[in-house]
Image (tube, helix red, strand yellow):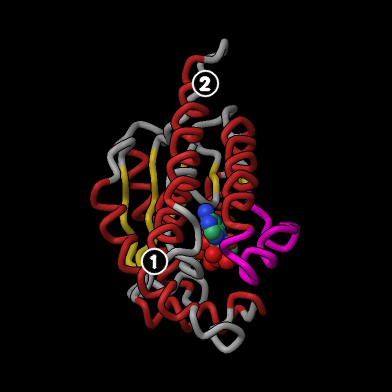
Amino acid sequence: MIVLSGTIGAGKTSLTTMLADHLGSKALYESVDDNPILPLFYENPKRYGFLLQNYFLNKRLDNIYDAQDSPLNIIDRSIYEDQLLFQLNADMERATQTEADIYSDLLDNMMEQVDHSEHALQKNPGLLIYISVSFETMLKRIQKRGRNFEQIDHDPALYDYYQQLNQRYAAWFDQYDRSPKLKIDGDQYDFVEDPKAAKAVLTMVDEQLRQLGLLV
Ligand SMILES: Nc1ncnc2c1ncn2[C@@H]1O[C@H](COP(=O)(O)OP(=O)(O)OP(=O)(O)O)[C@@H](O)[C@H]1O
């Protein structure tokens, strides 16, 4: 499987759709509109953060199971980023460190279960694609998409949260070593609006997949 990663509004969902169309594989999404906890979390992170992480953990494991039947299936967000998001919440006192530690232990345990389960499911992706965007681009995209609960106008404290999140992503990607990885500059390649940029990105991914022997 191929997994996408990147901050809020980076374009993971769009690139997942484009890649699945291009490769003729299955796209697995984490639907935001059907998530009953997300608006509650934005309203009251302290109360709902831990519940939200458990909800995501469950969904992301489902996606990993569903993606097993082809190495070219694509998941629109990696399971590993949740830890980064939750630790940020703990550091900003939007969750407790105990909650973040319990979550990390649970994640490790569950990933081990996946690894050692009867059919030895593949837990790590064949390729992780990271879309990097500047803080300015991130803010513009969040605004353009217009999900009410994500707007800074709705909650000014989100500015700081988003800024720290954007900074942490770069460091997270640098230390990520569970699979081969590819970084796409989402500021340079606006693959949603610009067909030439979209083509360039697909070519980059194809090349990487060929090098990895995932595409012939
Ligand atoms: N582990 C998490 N902890 C807290 N919030 C999360 C977590 N994972 C996702 N979210 C929230 O869920 C929403 C959707 O996030 P996600 O980045 O997966 O999709 P997206 O914003 O649509 O990204 P893209 O535009 O790249 O497709 C965002 O509001 C994000 O803050």
Q: Position of residue 93 (x, y in %)?
A: 44, 64
**Residue 17 falls in image quadrant:** bottom right
Can see residue 13?
no
56 falls in the magenta region: no
Q: 204 or 10: nearer the eye? A: 10
- What residue do we see at 51% from left, 85% from top? 156
Return the residue found at the far bottom: 153
Q: Secondary structure at mark 2?
A: helix
Q: Quadrant of the C terminus?
A: top left
Query: Cβ(mark 1) to ligand 1 < 8 Å?
Result: yes
In the rendered structure, the answer to whether residue 4 lies left or right of residue 182 reads: right
Q: Residue 113 — which label? A: 2
Q: Return the residue at label 1.
A: 165
Q: Is residue 45 above or below residue 51?
A: below
In this picture, which residue range is highlighted in magenta?
A: 29-47
Q: Residue 98 — which label? A: none
Amino acid type at circle 2 is Gln
Amino acid type at circle 1 is Leu
Q: Position of residue 212 (x, y in %)?
A: 32, 35
Q: Position of residue 174 (x, y in %)?
A: 24, 52
Q: Is residue 211 above or below residue 90?
A: above
Q: Is residue 152 above or below residue 187?
A: below
- The Cα–Cα distance between marks 1 and 2, rounded to whole angstroms, is 29 Å
